[in-house]
Amino acid sequence: MQYEGADVFNPALFPPEGEVDVLGIISSRRHLEDDLYNSHDQGSQQEHRRTSIFGKPIVEKGTGPITPGYGWQLFRSKPGYCDGSYNAVCGREPGDKCLLSGHEDSRGGILGNCLSGWLVMDLKDVKHGIIILKIETYHNPNTSTRTAGWIEVNDGKSRKLQTFPDTFAFDYAIDGRITTLDRHQYKLFSLDRRIGPNVDILQVMDDPTFPGPKDVEVGIRMRGCGRNLAFSLSHVYWG
């Protein structure tokens, strides 16, 4: 980064005195709770339709800790703390044309493939039993340089539009409890929540009886595709 700390006041980020404050109006809007409940009920119906057609995912009880893999890497990430707020200390790289622009969009993520092993994350203070992953599946397989030359998961150590092969499987683990989605289940479970071409939203936890707040360990991995697919985890949401 060129520098850290707060920026000087930028009048372009605030409405002129006497003008309508659109941000203030939006921030004070009424939350339509009934619509949220209806959306949840509709989502439950979609979940029932998916499982009745393709069967339920395979759920296994963990037999031990989920060991982090060696094959994950940061991809197109900006330096600093980039949380989307107007005053975030983010970017400010030598090539930026305007350091006060506050531009944080970089399509960054944590990149891996089916040889990368487990990506393990500790989510702090999960309160309501909800965890959602945003995954991009459009990346060229060659962008995953961490696994270059590997022919097996973790290189044998312990620790564009793409076609999913029939052998593909996606695993996610919640505190050691592993759930497996095969090729058809993964594509169907993420399809209803797809927000763009080859950008998937996976809700890996929705437990209204969750005894929070407490920390939760989440792990993901892909199997059965070698280096032929590249995935980038760009966001993890939890509440």
Image: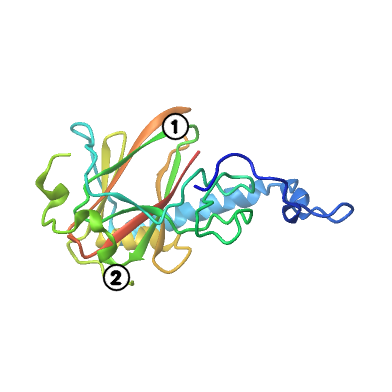
Residue drawn at x 46%, y 51% as measured from the top left: 78
Residue 162 numbered mark, or none = 2
Residue 198 percent location from the top left of the image: 39, 66
Identify the image's colour scheme: rainbow, by chain, secondary structure or one colour.
rainbow
Q: From what the image shows, is residue 225 above or below residue 152?
A: below
Res 157 quadrant in image: top left
Label 1 with label 2: CB-CB less than 8 Å: no
Secondary structure at numbered mark 2: loop
For residue 72, say whether it is visible: yes
Residue drawn at x 55%, y 44% as measured from the top left: 3
Q: Is residue 107 left or right of residue 168?
A: right
Residue 17 percent location from the top left of the image: 87, 52
- The front one of 92 and 141 is 92
- The front one of 50 and 140 is 140
Residue 129 percent location from the top left of the image: 45, 37
Q: Is residue 16 left or right of residue 121?
A: right
The residue carrying pointer 2 sits among few (fewer than 14), some (14 to 19) or many (20 or more) residues within 10 Å by Cα, namely: some
Residue 124 numbered mark, or none = 1
At label 2, the amino acid type is Gln
Q: From what the image shows, is residue 138 above or below residue 209?
A: below
